[in-house]
Amino acid sequence: MKGLLASIARLFAREQQLTGALGRLSEDPVALAEILLLFRMVLADGVVQPSQLTVFERICEEHFGVSRRDMPELHALLDSPKARSCDAKAFTLLGQLDTEARTTLLEDMMRIARASTVRDDGEDRLIRRTADFLGLKLENGTIEGKGTFHG
């Protein structure tokens, strides 16, 4: 816990500059909007389940290069004014993604939902609304012939 608090304090320090993947992420509003939406999926049922958080962290590492040791700083970044600004215009930003990137984002949301031990209507609604917004067809749990979603 002490390490987490120190990381958060460093993030908000006056001269704090994020480096590496977190630095690139903090300067990329579209990628930040993607991660915010993925984290919203973790929170969709109001309970942070460790299995969903683990999948979220894997996705952050696979797609955004954020290592697990940087997760405390990532969580602090997600709660920063910069992230709140991206969150307010997330769907406008996400509309800039090409079809492949939008599909990957929705598939990642589905991965997080499937990691849940208890399915919730909030998760299903978030996935369906996001699919609609992103212009992706979600029928019978499949995105345009891709991954299956059991919701």
Image (cartoon, rainbow, N blue to C red):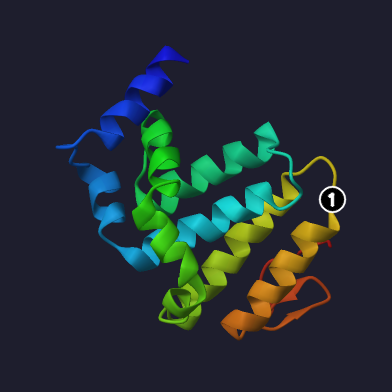
- Looking at the picture, does residue 137 appear above or below residue 24? below
Label tally:
1
Query: Residue 63 location in percent, x, y?
Result: 42, 54
Image quadrant where residue 67 sits = top left
Name the residue rendered at 73%, 40% in the picture.
Answer: 47
Residue, far left: 15
Q: In this view of the protein, which residue sits in the foreground, 147 or 63? A: 63
Name the residue rendered at 51%, 42% in the picture.
Answer: 58
Name the residue rendered at 45%, 46% in the picture.
Answer: 79
Q: Is residue 87 left or right of residue 66?
A: right
Question: Mark 1: which amino acid?
Answer: Arg
For mark 1, what is the residue? Answer: 119
- Looking at the picture, does residue 136 appear above or below residue 31? below
Q: Residues within 10 Å of mark 1 (few under 14, many from 20)?
A: some
Image quadrant where residue 134 sits = bottom right
Query: Residue 106 location in percent, x, y?
Result: 60, 67
Q: In this view of the protein, which residue sits in the foreground, 76 or 61? A: 76
Image quadrant where residue 144 sits = bottom right
Query: Residue 61 location in percent, x, y?
Result: 42, 44
Q: In this view of the protein, which residue sits in the foreground, 128 or 29? A: 29
Query: Residue 55 location in percent, x, y?
Result: 59, 43
Whether residue 100 appears in this view of the structure is yes
- Secondary structure beneath disc 1? loop
- Which quadrant is the C terminus positioned in? bottom right
Name the residue rendered at 84%, 75% in the picture.
Answer: 140
Whether residue 144 appears in this view of the structure is no
